[in-house]
Amino acid sequence: MMPNRFSICLLGALIPLGANAAAGAPLPRCSVDSQSYYLMRYTEVGTSATNLRTPTTSLDLAVVPASGSVTLTNIWNAQAAPTPSQWDGSPTAGATVAGGMGKDGYIYAMRAVGAWEPGWTNPNWQTHTRRYEMLRFGRSGVDNLGIVSGLGPYRNDANVTVSGAVDLRLGPNMNAADIDPVSGIMYVASFQSSGLLDKIFKIDVTQTPPQYVGTLALTQSIPGAQSGDFAIDAAGQYAYGVAKAAGTFGNSTSYRINLTTGVVESLATGLGIIPYGAAARLPNNSAKMAFYGLSTQIMTLPTGTLGTSQSTPTSTSSDGAACLPKFKTTLQCVPLTLVDADNNVATCTIALDQPAPIGGIAIALTPPVTDTRYTTTCASSVTIPANTTTAQCTIAATANTTPGDGDVTATVSLTTPAATDDYELSTPSSASILIKNDDLPTVNLTCTPNTLTDSPGQVSTCTVTSNVPASVGGMTIALVPPVANPRYISTCGANISLAEGESSNTCTITANPNTTPGDGDVASSLALAIPQPGSGYQIGTPSQATVFVRDDDVAAATPEATLSCTPTTLVDAENQVSICTVSLSTPAPAGGLGINIIPPATNGRYSTTCASPLSVSASASTATCAIAATPNTVAGDGSASALVQLIPGTGYGVGNQAQATVNINDDDQTMTVAPVPTLGQWAMMILSILVASIGVGLSRRQLRK
């Protein structure tokens, strides 16, 4: 029963979805250091109309050494591909002679029909669609993606003609193809001897079903009568091929086609008489391609020259496709240093140099060893999702407040992949995360005692103490040592060390003994210096100490000088002397003591022995000088004063009685001379005498009575 139109369309739409299971995963990738490509060897065993066979393809990975035979590793052989065409007499055909590597890691290939393949009968040729079908090759087999929409005309079951760009129903097969590694568009051609030598058809293989998107018209036919496969360079600019001239012994010429303009350029000539059915770019060198006929030869771009033949298993026909380079994988963690506190997390990024394929890609890891100082989400593998380039895991420090628990390292690395894996390691491929102890030991400083005297045996011991014992290698503590001073010596230098396992160490400050009174007190200061980064400790309290070195040499008491003069009053007569005495509160020191005075001012009324300084002999307490009155008999010459004063000087003090005054008085009497009376005075005197005489007489007369 012929399917109706709806059933044909539905079948064509569903096949690509369910067929993925047949193709399986994308094809294995190749190391970028290898000279490798995929070789599809076409075999057709049918030989006549009575011996009909469906052609098959064997898919191999070819590794081309620098010299010698090519090694083939078989991926699969003679895989079937269900066909959506009910008119196809060979519904499991999976053969091709025109394919290319897609950006997703699958080979996309136009189906090839064998010369003796069972199929449609002549009356049914108008419905034939086999050469329009797109196949997809994966690790497990072949998918038939159905008819390429718009590629070629055919008549559907309703007898309606579907239009297309080129009629391939009667052949020949498409025999040259590759996929632009940049755009992902397939370029396919029929460069058979009876094919279309001046056209290339473009197909978008990423659509479902695949879509014909245009024709590249060449400026001229390719050189020669036919060509096998071509390969597109890594930049997607040119397709390179080798064309053979007509005839059995026709020679070959390499060429390239500009995929933008269609310009055809002939390159190297004289390349032999063997057709090259397979071509592929190589992953290790963008200037090299592999061409396969009866053997493999390496083409050098852009000259198009071929290298020496390297033995390769043969086939009826063939096609080639590039092997995608393996993903380059790196691992980086940021930051590389954590501390054992909250929110200290390193993010490790596993990155590919190109987006991951369909289904993603699992990258094997060697996770950090288990340790209580950190946690991690980095397991034995991490999957990078499809169409992305990165995946992440984390290493988080475990917060604690334990000083002295040291540092630990968490190392995560990419595990070396198996040869069959689709990725290889690049650099960096590992990272070590240092989890540092930020709970540093706390050190403090004390000095005991904190007061010394400048006497023998006066020592202060300064102790630097850590709250936890020093770890392996010990601990060096930076100090700010005391400044140099002759009053003390110190063993405290620029640093002090705590031995491994020890919690403290000491240094000393020692007073220099002396007997010098009055040299005062000094302070000796010691402090913990601000630690440099990475010193491994922190400063606590107290962090500094001051040791006082005090003067204990008591000086002799400073004598106090006072002054007195005796007597304090003289007269200007003979032997009138006042003794002025300077008295000290304590005896004068050795060598005596000079007392500064202000002696009496010069005056003719007296003389003095008081001069400055007035010397007090050693161990004596007094010194004297004299003020003597100058005798005279001059009455009325008045009095004079002699003032003596003490003034401050070295080695003594001045008391409250610091001055004395000696008065020199005049002791000479004055003689009074009576004046000569005047005439009137004489008269009065006589009268007074007479009166007095009369009075006396009267008194006597009364007595006689």
Image (spheres, grey):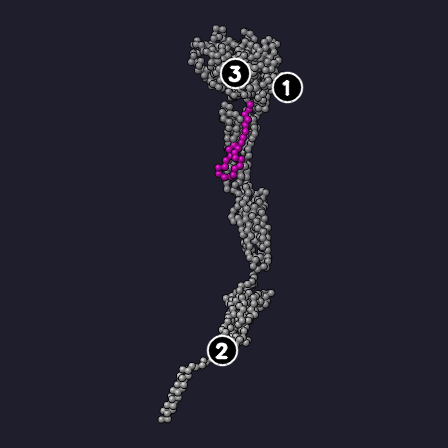
Q: Residue at x 48, y 19 (%)?
A: 206
Image quadrant occupied by the N terminus: top left
Q: Which one is in front, 207 or 635? A: 635
Marks 2/1 in contact by CB < 8 Å: the verdict is no
Which dot marks residue 669?
A: 2
Which dot marks residue 261?
A: 3
Image quadrant occupied by the C terminus: bottom left
Q: Range of the magenta residues?
A: 325-348
Q: Is residue 256 visible?
A: yes
Which dot marks residue 91?
A: none
Q: Residue at x 47, y 80 (%)?
A: 673
Identity, as a three-letter code, of the amino acid under mark 2: Gln
Residue lying furthest bottom: 705
Q: Main secondary structure of the magenta part?
A: strand
Secondary structure under tag 1 reads loop
Q: Earlier in the sequence, mark 1 or mark 3?
A: 1
Where does residue 177 sit, x and y in percent of width and height? Answer: 53, 15
Q: CA distance from mark 2 to mark 1?
A: 162 Å
- Hey, which quadrant is residue 305 in on the image? top right
Identity, as a three-letter code, of the amino acid under mark 1: Gly
Per the image, the residue denoted by label 1 is: 68
Q: CA distance from mark 2 to mark 3?
A: 158 Å
Secondary structure under tag 3 reads loop
Q: CA distance from mark 1 to mark 3?
A: 39 Å
Q: Which one is in front, 646 or 546? A: 646
Residue lying furthest top: 123
Q: Earlier in the sequence, mark 2 or mark 1?
A: 1
Identity, as a three-letter code, of the amino acid under mark 3: Thr
